[in-house]
Image (cartoon, grey):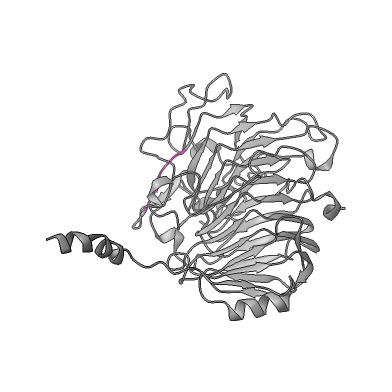
């Protein structure tokens, strides 16, 4: 008996699974060739340390489940060239990119810095954390997958018409619109939505974030300064946004004479369903363009670009329009909910592209059926004042459990570039 008692601690120790220490690989420099060599030699789940320096990446492909760790913002500075770089989600583990400053200039919206590829459901998430992205006259990310991407504690700086995040599975190849929604805690493991949290956005005024075909977006705890969260419906895009959660963000407008302050809206929704709550909005008034709504709701699919066909063929509900969801078998009406927003919350729900068919908007969108506005009436004159949440809705865990060691980003409201980046921007 005494012998057994003495052996128990050893037996317990042996019963604990052995956790292998991850491999560490040090790239010789930040050059594309040296980082590629480090990637080639690294095992799955390794950490690749990329030293400080200024280098260029163009046409680079990163397709291994590793942590690519730069020396820090303003230290490892990567200029993105004219050939788009590709990062691909991996089934073997998480691909994490952290500690870099990425910059790109020129090429227009079509000239993306990164394409994000990979399987929506079977691959592990990809995480961009603690980076700075600085762009001018260009696009930054084209995300060709419905979800499984996390952006945490990054800063994004750009010009008026620059695009930071375009989330667009153009053919819905992964079947996002054929699968039930993953709103809130329905995304059980936090791997099926795009999570954008604790970042700062400066500029990208006209299309900073574009939640487009098949996109499942959770946009939370960010600061947008002269920037907006945009979307597409089934109109100029073949599928449009799947669903969205926009909450606990701060939307700031400088209300000055700069081009960046000319905002048409802070949040623009053109299809699908979701929730908009606990955000704080600056009044979009003054500037060059005058007073603008903070939240804009449109149904272009019943206006000038009609998936149902000619005007005589268009009937409610238009495919994938505002307030439409899908349960895995059929479409159903699932209203957009707003509550708990503060500051100035002006909502415009109306036609936007001339209404050539002469339709009545309320035949296609009705409060109480396609949208529920529970904001306080003192903030939003259209709101009920109840501030009641969407029944049955619970937000997914925040911060995202797969994000660790995040610093900075979420509270910045300055119109200047992040500390230490002024020389790079200039």
Out of 425 and 7, give the one closest to the viewer.
7
Outermost residue on the top side: it is 378
**What residue lies at 50% left-to-right and 60% top-to-bottom?**
148
Magenta run includes residue 250: no
Where in the figure is residue 201, as x and y percent of width and height?
A: 69, 46
Out of 345 and 425, give the one closest to the viewer.
425
Where in the figure is residue 374, as x and y percent of width and height?
A: 48, 27
Q: In this view, does 43 lie above or below 411?
A: below
- Which span is picked out in magenta? 331-336
Q: Main secondary structure of the magenta part?
A: strand
The quadrant holding residue 378 is top right
Outermost residue on the front side: it is 2
In the rendered image, the quadrant that contains the N terminus is bottom left
Res. 81 visible in picture: no
Out of 181 and 114, give the one closest to the viewer.
114
Where in the figure is residue 120, as x and y percent of width and height?
A: 47, 65
Query: Would you say 225 lies left or right of 137 here?
Result: left
Magenta run includes residue 334: yes
Res. 213 visible in picture: yes
The quadrant holding residue 190 is bottom left
């Amino acid at each position: 008996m005494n012998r057994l008692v003495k052996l128990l601690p050893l037996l317990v120790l042996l019963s604990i699974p052995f956790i292998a220490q991850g491999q560490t690989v040090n790239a010789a420099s930040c050059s594309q060739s040296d980082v590629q060599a480090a990637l080639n030699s690294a095992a799955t789940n390794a950490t690749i340390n990329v030293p400080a320096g200024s280098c260029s990446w163009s046409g680079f492909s990163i397709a291994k489940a590793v942590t690519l760790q730069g020396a820090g913002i303003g230290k490892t500075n990567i200029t993105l060239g004219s050939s788009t770089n590709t990062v691909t989600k991996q089934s073997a583990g998480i691909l994490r990119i952290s500690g870099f400053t990425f910059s790109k200039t020129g090429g227009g919206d079509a000239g993306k810095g990164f394409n994000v590829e990979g399987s929506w459901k079977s691959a592990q998430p990809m995480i961009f954390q603690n980076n700075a992205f600085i762009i001018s006259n260009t696009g930054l990310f084209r995300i060709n997958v419905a979800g499984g991407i996390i952006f945490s504690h990054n800063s994004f700086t750009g010009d008026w018409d620059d695009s930071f995040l375009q989330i667009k599975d153009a053919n819905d190849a992964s079947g996002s619109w054929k699968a039930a929604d993953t709103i809130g805690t329905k995304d059980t493991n936090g791997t099926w939505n795009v999570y954008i949290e604790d970042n700062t956005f400066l500029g990208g005024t006209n299309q900073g974030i574009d939640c487009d075909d098949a996109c499942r977006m959770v946009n939370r705890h960010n600061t947008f300064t002269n920037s907006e969260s945009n979307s597409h419906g089934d109109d100029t895009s073949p599928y449009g946004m799947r669903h969205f959660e926009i909450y606990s963000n701060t939307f700031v407008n400088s209300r000055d004479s700069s081009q960046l302050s000319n905002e048409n809206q802070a949040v623009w929704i053109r299809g699908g369903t979701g929730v908009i709550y606990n955000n704080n909005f600056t009044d979009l008034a003054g500037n060059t363009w005058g007073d603008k709504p903070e939240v804009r709701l449109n149904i272009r699919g019943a206006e000038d670009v009609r998936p149902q066909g000619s005007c005589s063929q268009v009937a409610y509900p238009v495919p994938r329009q505002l307030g439409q969801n899908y349960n895995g078998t059929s479409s159903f009406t699932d209203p957009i909910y707003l509550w708990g927003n503060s500051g100035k919350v002006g909502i415009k729900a109306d036609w936007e592209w001339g209404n050539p068919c002469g339709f009545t908007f309320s035949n296609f969108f009705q409060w109480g059926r396609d949208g529920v506005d529970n904001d306080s009436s003192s903030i939003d004159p259209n709101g009920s004042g109840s501030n009641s949440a969407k029944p049955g809705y619970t937000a997914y865990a925040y911060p995202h459990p797969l994000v660790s060691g995040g610093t900075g980003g979420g509270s910045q409201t300055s119109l200047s570039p992040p500390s230490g980046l002024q020389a790079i921007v200039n």
